[in-house]
Amino acid sequence: MSASSTPADRSADDAARQARAWQALRRHTPARIGLGTTGSAIPTRHLLEFQLDHAEARDAVHLPLDVDRLAGGLTGLLGGAPVLSVRSAAEDRASYLQRPDLGRRLHPRAAATLPHGEYDIAFVVADGLSARAVHDHAPGLLREVAAALPDWRAAPVVVATGARVALGDEVARALGARMVAVLIGERPGLSSADSLGVYLTYDPSVPRTDAERNCLSNIRPPHGTDYPTAAATLVRLMTQARLRRLTGVALKDDSPALPAPPDRPLSR
């Protein structure tokens, strides 16, 4: 900077340096950091991005699950059994959102439609709070998991609507499965409206708490965990759960730490 530079020049140079520093940090997170100001407000571009993300999160919560489309993507992944569908005791989406307890219970007539057998594992694909996440990611993840389970007796895949995590326990009891994995749409955030979670529960024949489940979260390539990594983790947990006959806080994934993600922009 020359000796003749003005205060305005120095202020502009400082602002440029700060902008470059924030841009470097934004490459590693989708969080809204270092947005800057235009007058007393944030720049219009960032405001519009916030409003778009907020709208996508709201849409994800209210988007109905397309059961037929989803079943088409899941058919054949675990043998030749047809994909089954059930719904919770919540009669509609409003009831589901206002009464979480209804989403944890099967509809009174649903259990009778599930064939009872002797299964090692049941997979329940549930809409949860983001049907978009289930549409986008459940078939891809389950395809990876199925390829790693040649010696497991898997129940027919069940698609559940109006579902909370604990609904999987009732589904597994009706099927006669020793373990259940619930693939469910997670609560949307302002940077992730399509995040899929998986909850693994051993012996759902008795009421279980969340402390007795293992959870895999933020499955949403390319911005979150990819399908092969999530599938490998889930299969390891399933294998250990079968050996130790438990899930939850007493069951840890002892795999090596994940490699650092590639250095790529994560923000819009």
Image (cartoon, grey):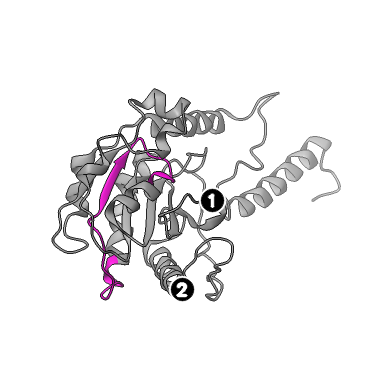
Amino acid type at circle 2 is Gln
User: Residue 127: x, y in percent?
Assistant: 35, 41
Q: Name the residue under label 2.
A: 240
Q: Is residue 34 magenta?
A: no
Q: Nearer the viewer, residue 234 or 82?
A: 82
Q: Nearer the viewer, residue 145 or 152?
A: 152
- Residues under numbered marks 1 and 2 in contact, where contact means CB atoms less than 8 Å apart: no
Q: Is residue 33 left or right of residue 162?
A: right
Q: In this view, does 31 lie to the left or right of 234?
A: right
Q: What stretch is highlighted in magenta?
A: 146-167
Q: Nearer the viewer, residue 118 or 98?
A: 118
Residue 206 visible at all: yes
| Residue in view at x 44 percent, y 75 percent | 243
- What secondary structure is marked by label 1? helix
- Tell me: residue 55, above or below residue 237: above
Q: Which mark is residue 210?
A: 1
How packed mark 2 is, by other alpha carbons closer than 10 Å (few <14, some 14-19, many 20 or more), is some
- What secondary structure is marked by label 2? helix
User: Residue 113: x, y in percent?
Assistant: 20, 44
User: Residue 105: x, y in percent?
Assistant: 39, 38
Q: Specify the quadrant of the image occupied by residue 198.
A: bottom left
- Magenta-drawn stretch, dominant element (helix, strand or loop): loop
- Tell me: residue 182, above or below residue 146: above
Q: In this view, does 64 lie to the left or right of 51?
A: left
Q: Specify the quadrant of the image occupied by residue 234.
A: bottom left
